Image (tube, grey):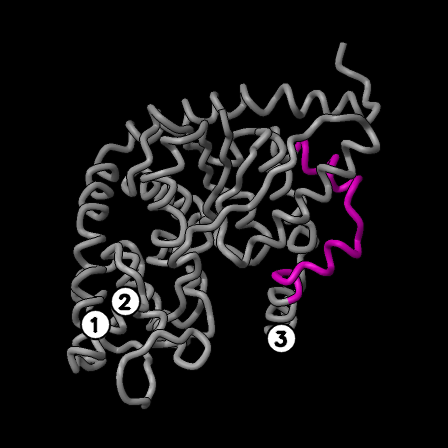
């Protein structure tokens, strides 16, 4: 059976972009068609300045939102990265295969290190090497597919390169994974800055719809979304990014095509206001059952503890043989 691995980083509250771009697909498709593992990658949250208590709080919230989005722990494996030692064990081996040049070419490293330097902060070494940890996350489980957003495909390509290099030098050990993306809303953009992804750790939050935002907050953010001054409604990502973003969000909520929606609005003489109102209503209704389920899970912390404990045990049982094999392949002496 095909095996899938993917994860969410607890560096901020999960957003509509996380849901439409990843979580919904994991719940509706991926967990049912393959052996699937979904992870809260908390170790990745340590690559930048952070509040330890907030990381713990967001890690738990992210785990409960995965279940609220529809992941079923009886069908797939849901766990926290730091609960499984094999991630860190394998990461060091892969650092011994990766090169400094590969790490410094990573787009996210360039962007995040530049922001840190501009803020007068030091750049942590882990920010440079975390793509190797991401590779370890994937390779430890022999994943065939990695559902990711467009901004993470470079890291999956690095994972493939490291796996192939390791296999060539030390013998066939790792499955070579591939990145997969949904056809629509793979990358939901900020409502106030349609050139930027709707990121959960952005400082400016006016254009970010969080999964736990109250309905009136959601509606207000959508109604204030940036569009343009051109007449009519058309779907053009390059020329009209703000309008295209709204159309893609509505398409993802309704199951329709963005271009078809644009044509219907244009033919009916409906303006941006009508599009924003319908998009806001669609998003509120989309999030309503997720928010209700999250409230139930938050009220039962013992249940979540059990899910994460069992998920880590299952993940460990899958990862350990592969990581042990990698240790032997590289020439490390097995424990007596």
From the image, tell me which residue sits under label 2: 260
Residue 94 belongs to magenta span: yes
Provide the major secondary structure of the magenta segment.
helix
Is residue 151 shown above or below 145? below
* Nearer-N-terminus badge (2/3): 3
- Report, in whole angstroms, how far the alpha carbon at label 2 lies from the one at label 1: 6 Å
Task: Look at the numbered discs 2 and 1 and tell me whether their residues touch, using CB distance below 8 Å.
Answer: yes
Q: What segment is highlighted magenta in the picture?
A: 89-110
- Residue at position x 36%, y 31% in the image: 32
Task: Look at the numbered discs 2 and 3 and tell me whether their residues touch, using CB distance below 8 Å.
Answer: no
Left/right placement of residue 42 relative to residue 332 reads: left
From the image, tell me which residue sits under label 1: 264
Is residue 290 shown above or below 118? above
Q: Position of residue 257 (x, y in %)?
A: 30, 61
- Residue at position x 59%, y 29% in the image: 142
Front tag of 2 and 3: 2
Left/right placement of residue 52 relative to residue 332 reads: left
Left/right placement of residue 74 relative to residue 122 reads: left
The front one of 175 and 264 is 264
- Residue at position x 40%, y 37% in the image: 30
**Dividing the image into 4 quarters, which one contains the C terminus?**
top right
Q: Label 3: state its secondary structure.
A: helix
Is residue 101 shown above or below 175? below
Q: Label 1: state its secondary structure.
A: helix
Q: Quadrant of residue 15?
A: bottom left
User: How many C-alpha atoms fall within 10 Å of the one at disc 1: few (<14), some, or many (≥20)?
Assistant: some
Task: Specify the label residue 118 is tagged with.
Answer: 3
């Amino acid at each position: 059976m095909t095996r899938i691995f993917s994860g969410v980083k607890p560096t901020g509250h999960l957003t509509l972009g996380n849901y439409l771009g990843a979580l919904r697909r994991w719940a509706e498709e991926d967990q049912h068609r393959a052996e699937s593992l979904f992870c809260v990658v908390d170790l990745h949250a340590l690559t930048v300045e952070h509040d330890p208590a907030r990381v713990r709080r967001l890690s738990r919230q992210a785990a409960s939102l995965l279940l609220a989005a529809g992941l079923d722990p009886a069908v797939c494996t849901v766990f926290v990265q730091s609960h499984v030692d094999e991630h860190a064990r394998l990461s060091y081996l892969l650092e011994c295969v990766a090169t400094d040049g590969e790490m410094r070419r990573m787009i996210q490293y360039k962007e995040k290190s530049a922001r840190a330097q501009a803020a007068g902060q030091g750049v942590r070494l882990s920010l440079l090497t975390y793509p190797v940890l991401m590779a370890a996350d994937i390779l430890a489980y022999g994943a065939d597919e990695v559902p990711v957003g467009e901004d993470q495909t470079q890291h999956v390509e690095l994972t493939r390169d490291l796996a192939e290099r390791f296999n060539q030098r030390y013998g066939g050990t790792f499955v070579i994974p591939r990145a997969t993306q949904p056809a629509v809303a793979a990358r939901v953009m900020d409502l106030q800055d349609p050139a930027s992804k709707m990121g959960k750790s952005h400082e400016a939050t006016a254009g970010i719809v969080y999964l736990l935002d109250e309905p009136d907050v959601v509606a207000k953010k959508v109604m204030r979304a940036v569009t343009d001054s051109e007449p009519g409604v058309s779907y053009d990502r390059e020329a009209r990014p703000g309008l295209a973003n709204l159309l893609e969000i509505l398409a993802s909520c309704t199951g329709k095509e963005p271009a078809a929606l644009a044509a219907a609005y244009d033919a009916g003489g409906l303006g941006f206001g009508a599009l924003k109102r319908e998009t806001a209503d669609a998003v509120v209704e989309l999030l309503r059952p997720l928010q209700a389920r999250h409230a139930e899970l938050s009220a039962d912390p013992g249940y979540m503890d059990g899910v994460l404990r069992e998920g880590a045990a299952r993940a460990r049982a899958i990862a350990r043989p592969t990581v042990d094999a990698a240790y032997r392949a590289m020439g490390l002496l097995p424990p007596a």
